[in-house]
Each structure stands twice: as C-alpha cells, then as structure tokens.
Amino acid sequence: MFGVQGRVVASITLRATMGRKRVFLFAIPPLILVLVTVLLKLAHPPATDWPSHILGDFGFSVVLPLTALIIGTSVLGAEIDDGSVIHLLATPVRRSTVIVSKFVVAAFLTMIFVAVPELIAGLIATGGATKLAVGLFVGALVGSVIYNAVFVMISVLTTRAIAVGLLYLLVWEGVLGNFASGARILSVEQYSLGVANSIAHNTGLNAHLGLPTAVVMGAVVTVATLAFAIRRLGSFSLKGDAV
Amino acid sequence: MSAIELRNVSRWYGNVVAINDITMTISQGVTGLLGPNGAGKSTLLHLIAGFLEPSRGELTVGGAASWRNPDIYRVLGLVPERDSVYAFLTGQEFVRATARLHKLPDPDAAAQRAIGIVEMTGTQDRRISTYSKGMRQRIKVAAALVHDPQVILLDEPFNGMDPRQRLHMMDLLEGLADQGRTILFSSHILEEVERLSGTIQVIVSGRLAASGDFRAIRRLMTSRPHVFLVRTSDDRRLGATLIGRPAVTGVEVTGRGLQVRASDYGAFSRELATLTRQEGIRLRELLPEDESLESVFAYLVES
C-alpha cells in the first residue's frame, strides 16, 4: 500500500515522534486511565455502572482526543514548524503519500497509546472480555483514525494546530455537543461512542448516534479532511525574506 | 534550453511587493544571486524551487513550471538556508532516505557517492545533531546531490561557515559546475560571489538591479561616484584646489572635515596625494563615506 517512499516517510515520522520528549505526554493520559480503573476496582464503588462512565466519558472525551491531538498535530506540524519538512517536500514524493503515511503513523500510535490502554482498563474494570471492554476498544480504534485525520489536516492549515484542535474539542465537542443535538452529527467523539455502543449496548456510554450514521459520517470526515490536507500540502509555501 | 527561466515574475504579499517584474535566464555554470539582506533573494529562490507561487509571470526549470509540480525535483536539488535537518538521523541515514524518496535504483550507492563528493564519508555515521554548522551544510548538499540533479539551488550556503569550510564549499560548487550543472546560490557578501561566479544577478528591493558578467558589474560598482571625508591642515584651501580637478564633482566644507564627491575613484586617489604635497597641506584622514554594500546596490538601481 505504501511503497518505498511511504515507508521512508513513515519511518522518519515514527522516529521523530517517538524520539521527542513529548512521547511522555502521550503516555500520561492512558496511564491515568488505567490507574484510576485499578483504584476504583479495588475500592468497589457502590455505583455498578462506573466502568462505562470512566472508560466512556473520561476515556472518550479526555484521553482519546487529547492524545490524538498531541500526536496528530505533531507528526507533520512539528516538521513544518522547524522547517525540516522542506527536505521531504523537495523530492518527487507525492503529497498524498506524505499525508497518508503521516496519518497512518499518527493513527497507529494513538491506537497503541489509547485503544490498547482502553482495552486493558476495560478488562480490569469488567473482569474479562465483556461486550463493554471490546466495544470501548473498537470505538477507540475508530476514534484514533478519525481524530488523527482531522488533526493532521489542522496541522497543515495552521501553525497553531494545538490551540485550534483544543478549541474544537472544548467548544464543539465539549459544549455544543452536549446541548445541541445537531452538533453531534459532526462530533468525532460521538462517532467513536456510536461504534463502541453498537457492540457494548450500554446506555452509560451516552452515545447519541447509531452505528450507520457513525460509520458513514466517520468515513466521510476522514476522507474529506485527508483530501483537503493533501490539497493544502500541494500548495505548501515557504516565506521569503522581508522587503 | 536554459536551465532556469523567469519572465516578468512578480510576487507580492498583500500590498508588499517582494519580487518585482523579474526577467532572467540562468544557464550552466555558477551564478551568484547577490543582494543585501531582505532584498528578495530567498523569495526568488523559493519561487524557482516551487515553494512559492508567482503572483504574476512565468517561471520554468528545465522547461517545466515548478509550482505544484513535485516531478521538478527529479532535475532540481535544493539546499535551503534554514539549518533544520532531521537531527536524530545520522548523515548517512539522511542522505540514504533522500535517495529512497527519489526512488533511486541503488540508494546505498547513490548515498555513498554523494557523501563522498562532500567529503563526509568519515563522519557519515554520526548523528546530525552532533555536526558543526559547516558539516550540516555539507550533508544538506549531499542530500541535494544524491539524485544527480542538473540544477542546484543553494540559499546562503556560506552562512556560519569558517573560512576553511567556505573554501571547501566553493571548490565543491566549482567542481559541480565543471561537470555541466547549473548552480544558483544566493549571498549578501560581495567577496563570496566574486570568488565563485562569473555571472551574477543583483537583486535590490525585489528588483533585478544588474545582471551579467561579474567583472563588468564590478567595474560599474567601482567607477560609480564616491563620497570621501578628508581632514587636512587646511580644508578650505584644499577644497578650492580640488574643485578645479575633473575627477571631483563636488566639495563641501563640513564641521567634520571636507566632503568630496569624486566621479573617478582611481583618479581622485592619485591626485589627492599629489595635490596635498604640492600645496604643502598635511593630510590627516581620508575616509570613504559610502562603501556599504547597500550604497553600492542603490547606485546600481539608480543607474
């Protein structure tokens, strides 16, 4: 699927992303998730539906989007910021190869740092491979893909990708998504929860979209944002000296 | 066919014109792009390299437009000014990765050849983060050379280099030009361009101020009107004597001394010594007042 050029881009991206100190940032949210799950499991809280709240609410509205934001905006954004991307773009590699390779690395890393911990926490919280644990895992896998498509695109559009991404998460998904039902149709969190709930069938997840809507909208958003990112990278410009 | 052709190329940002209606042709050999800081040299190189869209005009490299055309990098190598490389890679990994991005049939051999050209074979296994500025510059040149391009663009390649590294880079660029390549490099230092290129393009305030053989332009630069400040034991008497000389176009007595405008730099220098000796005037100080590169460029624009 990748070809030689895609493998080179992916390999450099992986080394650049994992080599930075921010890799510790990726690990903190999932560690907190697993730690809280272990503590709650040991504490035997009276509310029996705590797994869906912790792993659904905290996991899908905090851990997944924040980790995807840090990874998705850094795989290409960091190279654009420091200027090293020029060495990649001054070669005949297709811009679609650059975007797709970096997106795949970002999605893969987010799956490792979020979906796997979600599964581990789900197994601990529910005591085995329950529908909730599997549903959360699959939902997190899907969320890793869609969020990273969005954040890679934002990193091509602006040098303030983290701020713009946070604005989307806090204002659109955090505020509007809770109060305006129309906003949920464009909420990556709801796509992820919709997929998770189609397996878990758990009202505690607060999923507001059905599986067909979540899958179709998730696919449309992923393809559209990646296509837009490819188009914008094709017009990548360097600033010259001021006159 | 010329390697690089610009026809009436302009580039502006809002109301600011960075490149103003430039037409130039650059062929095989070394060409220096000379101009003061902020003149538009980098903007012009970015336009040629396909990293800026011309607001107006036509620009081709090897006969093809460079904007939104990644295929252009099969014949073009770029050494950017910014010192940002993948510092976590070794020099060899960086050049080899570039060779693979070019889909070269034998990337290892191509990388070794390019690293050999810039004489970095002994340090190729060190991480780029441990390299000096000059070594980084050379490894960037190796990456730009790995696919054996016909055209090589270098943005301020001598910045931050010590004199020995500069000489080495100059020899390297001369060697590449001798092999039939087109080398275009930018610089704001006259001596760098003088040492390296027979042909120059002078850019001032986004406009092409002069273009052609370096020696002819250098003559134009040195034969321009010069302003000197002369301090002597009797400024007024010397001024009265100087104003009658053909090489002098103006004299003004100022609080700091005698300001003399000379139309012929060489004739004035020779006559001043003779005149002061004849008149018994003691010459205390002779200072050129407009020797900055900016004033040289400004003169070229006016002429």
Image (spheres, coloured by chain):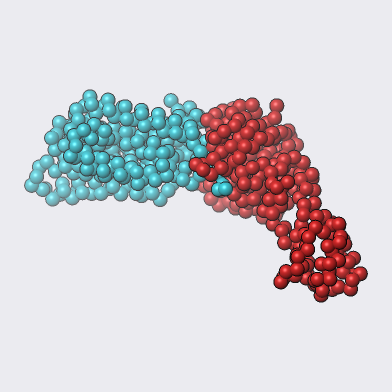
Chain colours: A cyan, B red
- Please determine whether, in this image, residue B139 is positioned above or below residue A219: below
Toward which corner of the image does residue A59 lie, by quadrant?
A: top left
- Please determine whether, in this image, residue B189 is positioned above or below residue A144: below
Residue A27 or A230: which is nearer the viewer?
A230
Indicate the position of residue A130 as horizontal and vertical percent values: 17, 34
Toward which corner of the image does residue B40 lie, by quadrant?
A: top right
Whether residue B76 is visible to the viewer of this picture, yes or no, is no
- For the N terminus of chain A, the quadrant is top left
Residue drawn at 49 percent across, 41 percent down = B14
Residue drawn at 84 percent across, 71 percent down = B237
Residue drawn at 69 percent across, 54 percent down = B295
Would residue B61 be found to the left or right of residue B212 on screen?
left
Toward which corner of the image does residue B91 lie, by quadrant?
A: top right
Would residue B4 be found to the left or right of residue B270 on screen?
left
Residue B149 or A17: which is nearer the viewer?
B149
Indicate the position of residue B174 as horizontal and vertical percent values: 73, 41
Would residue B144 be found to the left or right of residue A29 on screen?
right
Indicate the position of residue B249 as horizontal and vertical percent values: 80, 57
Q: Residue furthest left?
A: A46
Q: How many marks?
A: 0
Q: Residue furthest bottom?
A: B233
Indicate the position of residue B121 as horizontal and vertical percent values: 64, 44
Residue A235 or B149: which is nearer the viewer?
A235
Whether residue B183 is visible to the viewer of this picture, yes or no, is yes
- Please determine whether, in this image, residue B300 is positioned above or below residue A187: below
Residue drawn at 41 percent across, 39 percent down = A157
Residue B299 or B29: which is nearer the viewer?
B299
